[in-house]
Image (spheres, rainbow, N blue to C red):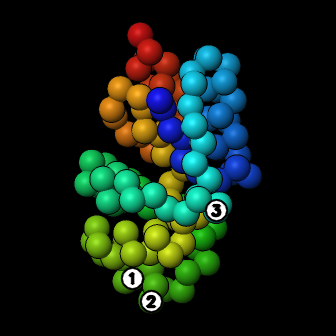
Amino acid sequence: MTTLYGIPNCDTVKKARTWLDDQGIAYTFHDFKKAGVPAQLDTWIAQLGWEAVLNRKGTTWRKLDAAQQAAVHDAASAAALLRAQPSAIKRPVVEWDDGPVTVGFAPDAWAARRN
């Protein structure tokens, strides 16, 4: 089954959930705030690159001081930050039932996957 990872009050996650519901795609929702960061974080970073998984445009990143931001320079340092600050993970992360992992809401790309 497809798994959607995120936080429920995130507008992008809300859009993604609505899209999945409208398309009739069954999925489970993993709330980073309640369930924490899953062990799959390392797999996401390995598959997509830490730069894709880290949300540098979000409030959590912008609230970090310059030293904390500068300390994120590779996969290991990014993973450590993301475990400590789950809201810095770009959302949503989707583990599709057929294997691939995607980050961010891209309805056109998601629709193309179904065809």
Q: Is disc 2 surrounded by few (<14), some (14 to 19) or many (20+) residues within 10 Å?
A: few
Which amino acid is tagged 1?
Ala
Mark 3, Cα crowd under 10 Å, few <14 / some 14-19 / many 20+, is few
Is residue 114 at least partly visible in the picture?
Answer: yes
Alpha carbon distance from label 2 to label 1: 5 Å
Q: Earlier in the sequence, mark 1 or mark 3?
A: 3
**Residue placed furthest toward the bottom:** 67
Counting from the top left corner in percent of width and height, residue 98 is at 35, 26
Q: Amino acid at mark 3?
A: Lys
Q: Which residue is mark 3?
A: 33
Depicted 75 relative to depicted 13: above or below: below
Residue 80 position within the rendered picture, expressed as x and y whole percent measured from the top left = 39, 75
Residue 112, horizontal then vertical, whole percent: 43, 17
Task: Report whether residue 92 is seen.
Answer: no
Disc 2 from disc 3: Cα separation:
25 Å
The answer to which of marks 2 and 3 sits earlier in the sequence is: 3
The residue carrying mark 1 is: 70
Query: Which residue corresponds to the image point at 37% horizontal and 70% vertical from the top-left?
Result: 78
* Disc 2 secondary structure class: helix
Q: Residues within 10 Å of mark 1 (few under 14, many from 20)?
A: few
Which quarter of the rendering shows the C terminus?
Answer: top left
23 left or right of 3? right
Q: Secondary structure at mark 1?
A: helix
- Residue 63 lies left or right of residue 77; in this view the side is right
**Residues tagged 2 and 1 counted as in contact (Cβ below 8 A):** yes
Residue at horizontal 47 percent and vertical 29 percent from the top: 1
Comparing labels 1 and 3, the label whose residue is closer to the camera:
3
Gap between marks 1 and 3 measured at Cα: 25 Å
Q: In terms of secondary structure, where does tag 3 sit?
A: helix
- Amino acid at circle 2: Ala
Within the image, what quadrant is residue 114 found in? top left
Report the residue marked by disc 2: 67
